[in-house]
Image: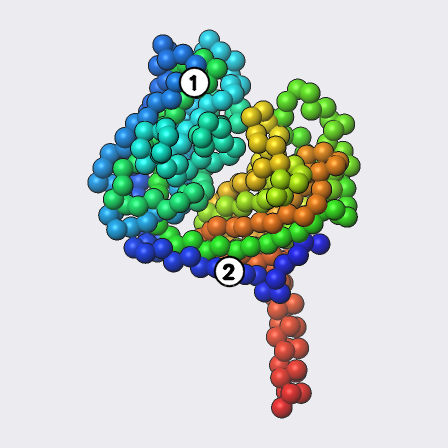
């Protein structure tokens, strides 16, 4: 079972100037990678000023857009990227948001999604100062040009960050046949996802909103993570999974940290899944959650159980008198 503190550890990070729940949104915009750009050409656009509030630190983001590849190329394109920075992307730029695996100095890989609507939520790598410029950066690698990112909706949230920590060890955990990430390479045969050790840790949150999970295996083994909602059944690894980052797609850093983020509901049961890529991938891991509220790593007590526990506490208190 995962190791946890007797009571979940909540570290409230108070950021100067942050207003509880304050959000700002940019008007939707569209960008296109020029058809003559060639491979590895990165585009940067300065977002309009006067949207963020000076003196406010923004800690979370929501982004949503439609992705339309050039029709001359296969719809399942690899190496599309976007990032938010404080200057045109390049040496010295601060990368505020780079969800997913990173390449080329923290520019984001969008992992081989089908065309259509794409959305992310997450915590910024470092808070975005309200008085700073903000750049939206995008590109198609491998000479995939003419890609359009349309109706881009970007919202920043200044809610203070609550950080929770947890840890575990899968060395002697049970085994399962894990889900197969559709972004895994053609050489990742189904037989390679069997006999994988896993831990599914129940948890619930106390506030609706964004929660970003990051785990580290300290470079010792290749981790795979996911979140399940309501229930977890190792015999049915695709049921109730709200999303995943297997860390197995091309371009992913082997043995690196894994990060996923979601909008979660208060007092709803979830399960954090830590497993390995291969049967040899197991061991100790540590985790951090950056979110809108606190996280309790446990099964939600039923109303009856809560009453029983309260009654037992009352009896114990009477005996101590």
- Image quarter of residue 228: top right
Q: Does residue 28 appear to the left or right of 103 in the view shown?
A: left
Answer few, some or many: residues within 10 Å of disc 2's Cα (few below 14, many 20 plus, some between 14 and 19): some
Q: Quadrant of the C terminus?
A: bottom right
Instruction: Name the residue nearer the viewer: 169 or 93.
Output: 93
- Image quarter of residue 130: top left
Q: Which residue is mark 1?
A: 40
Q: Does residue 183 appear to the left or right of 11 in the view shown?
A: right
- Image quarter of residue 16: bottom left
Residue 79, image x, y percentages: 49, 22
Outermost residue toward the left?
Answer: 50
Residue 71, image x, y percentages: 45, 11
For marks 1 and 2 on the same chain, the one whose residue lies earlier in the sequence: 2
Point 56% across, 26% down: residue = 251
User: Separation of disc 1 and disc 2 at Cα?
Assistant: 42 Å
Q: Is residue 319 above or below residue 199?
A: below
Tell me how many marks there are: 2
Point 58% across, 24% down: residue = 250
Instruction: Name the residue nearer the viewer: 207 or 187.
Output: 187
Point 45% across, 40% down: residue = 121
Q: Is residue 113 above or below residue 73?
A: below
Colour option used: rainbow
Secondary element under disc 1, as helix, strand or loop, is loop
Secondary element under disc 2, as helix, strand or loop, is strand
Residue 103, image x, y percentages: 49, 28
Q: Which is in the foreground here, disc 1 or disc 2?
A: 1
**Residue 10's disc number:** 2
Residue 216, image x, y percentages: 59, 44
Residue 37 visible in the displayed image: yes
Point 66% across, 57% down: residue = 3
């Amino acid at each position: 079972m995962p190791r946890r503190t007797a009571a979940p550890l909540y570290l409230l990070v108070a950021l100067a100037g942050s207003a509880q729940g304050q959000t700002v949104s940019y008007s939707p915009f569209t960008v296109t990678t020029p058809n003559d750009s060639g491979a590895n050409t990165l585009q940067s656009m300065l977002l309009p000023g006067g949207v963020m509030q000076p003196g406010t630190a923004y800690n979370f983001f929501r982004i949503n857009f439609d992705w339309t590849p050039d029709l001359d190329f296969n719809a399942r394109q690899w190496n599309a990227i976007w990032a938010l920075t404080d200057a045109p992307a390049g040496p010295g730029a601060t990368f505020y948001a780079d969800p997913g695996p990173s390449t080329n100095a923290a520019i984001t890989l969008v992992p081989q999604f089908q065309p259509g609507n794409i959305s992310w939520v997450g915590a910024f790598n470092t808070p975005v100062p309200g008085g700073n410029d903000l750049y939206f950066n995008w590109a198609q690698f491998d000479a995939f040009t003419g890609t359009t990112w349309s109706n881009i909706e970007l919202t920043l949230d200044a809610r203070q960050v609550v950080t929770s920590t947890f840890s575990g060890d899968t060395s002697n955990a049970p085994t399962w046949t894990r889900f197969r990430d559709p972004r895994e390479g053609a050489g990742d045969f189904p037989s390679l996802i069997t006999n994988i050790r896993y831990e599914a840790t129940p948890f619930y949150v106390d506030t609706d909103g964004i929660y970003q999970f990051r785990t580290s295996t300290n470079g010792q083994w290749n981790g795979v993570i996911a979140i399940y909602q309501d229930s977890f059944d190792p015999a049915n690894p695709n049921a109730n999974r709200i999303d995943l980052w297997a860390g197995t797609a091309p371009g992913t850093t082997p043995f690196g940290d894994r990060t996923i983020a979601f909008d979660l509901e208060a007092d709803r049961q979830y399960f954090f899944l830590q497993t390995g890529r291969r049967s040899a991938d197991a061991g100790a891991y540590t985790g951090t959650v950056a979110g809108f509220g606190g996280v309790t790593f446990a099964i939600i007590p039923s109303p009856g159980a809560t009453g029983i526990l309260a009654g037992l506490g009352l009896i114990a208190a009477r005996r101590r008198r």
